[in-house]
Amino acid sequence: MRRTLPTESEAREILARCRTRPPLRPPPPAGRHLTPLIKKLDAQFGRGASALEPRWREIVGERLARVCRPQKMTKGRGGAPGTLELRVVGAAALLVQHQSEEIIERVNLFLGARAVDKLRIQQGPVKPLADAAARPRPAGRRALPPLPASAEVELEASLEPVPDNLKAAFQKLGRAVLSLPPDNGSR
């Protein structure tokens, strides 16, 4: 025997009797609840490689800062020292490897004793140094005192035959040589 379909009014009555689930509410924002946990973990495990980045030039020196950057710091288990991963320009990887003990000492001086005990070197491109204009002037260089007017005129006269594109460099060199103290033969 074939079953007949319910009429529209019967279908409405059947659906009214069936209980349906209420629609799901959206989950609460996770960031608000995770902030205290993240602060606690940061206090417990300390700073990572991101804390090294702004002071990297001071930590490792100008020469190494040009060829390597801190990428990631992995903490050891049970309070053991961690591993610092460095991104290094390919040609400088050997230089960084040979200076790894010194780099570890300097990083531990910045982060605290026994923060890092190993370096992991990853070769690849390194972004250029930020704020290169704010670099300190090397200690060996100082501003040259001005030349006497007669020496300046003599220098200008001697550079007459020099091409214009080289004249500025020769003037700088000439001023540096003429401003040196006279050598009294004590070598």
Image: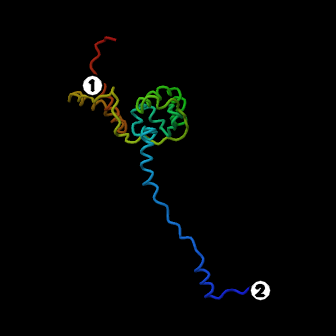
Residue 51, given in percent of the width and then of the height, sits at: 42, 39
Q: In front here: 148 or 81?
A: 81
Query: Relative to residue 31, is residue 130 depicted above or below?
Result: above
Image quadrant where residue 172 sits:
top left
Q: How is the image coloured?
A: rainbow
Tell me if I can see residue 88 in this picture.
no
* Front: mark 1 or 2: 2
Q: Who comes first in sequence, dot 1 or dot 2? A: 2
Furthest toward the right, the residue is 1
Tell me if I can see residue 116 in this picture.
yes
Which amino acid type corresponds to the residue marked 1 in the rendered image? Answer: Ser
Which corner quadrant holds the N terminus? Answer: bottom right
Q: In front here: 140 or 183?
A: 140
Residue 11, given in percent of the width and then of the height, sits at: 62, 84
Q: In front here: 161 or 57?
A: 57
Pointer 2: residues within 10 angstroms few (<14), some, or many (20+)?
A: few
Query: Relative to residue 84, is residue 31 depicted above or below?
Result: below
Furthest toward the top, the residue is 186
Q: In front here: 88 or 179?
A: 88
Mark pair 1, 2: CA separation: 116 Å
Q: Is residue 55 left or right of residue 67?
A: left
Could you tell me which secondary element the residue under label 1 belongs to? loop
Image quadrant where residue 169 sits:
top left
Rendered residue at 50%/66% (across/down): 25
Could you tell me which secondary element the residue under label 2 belongs to? loop
Q: Which residue is mark 2?
A: 2
Which amino acid type corresponds to the residue marked 2 in the rendered image? Answer: Arg
Q: Which residue is mark 1?
A: 179
Rendered residue at 41%/29% (across/down): 109
Furthest toward the front, the residue is 17
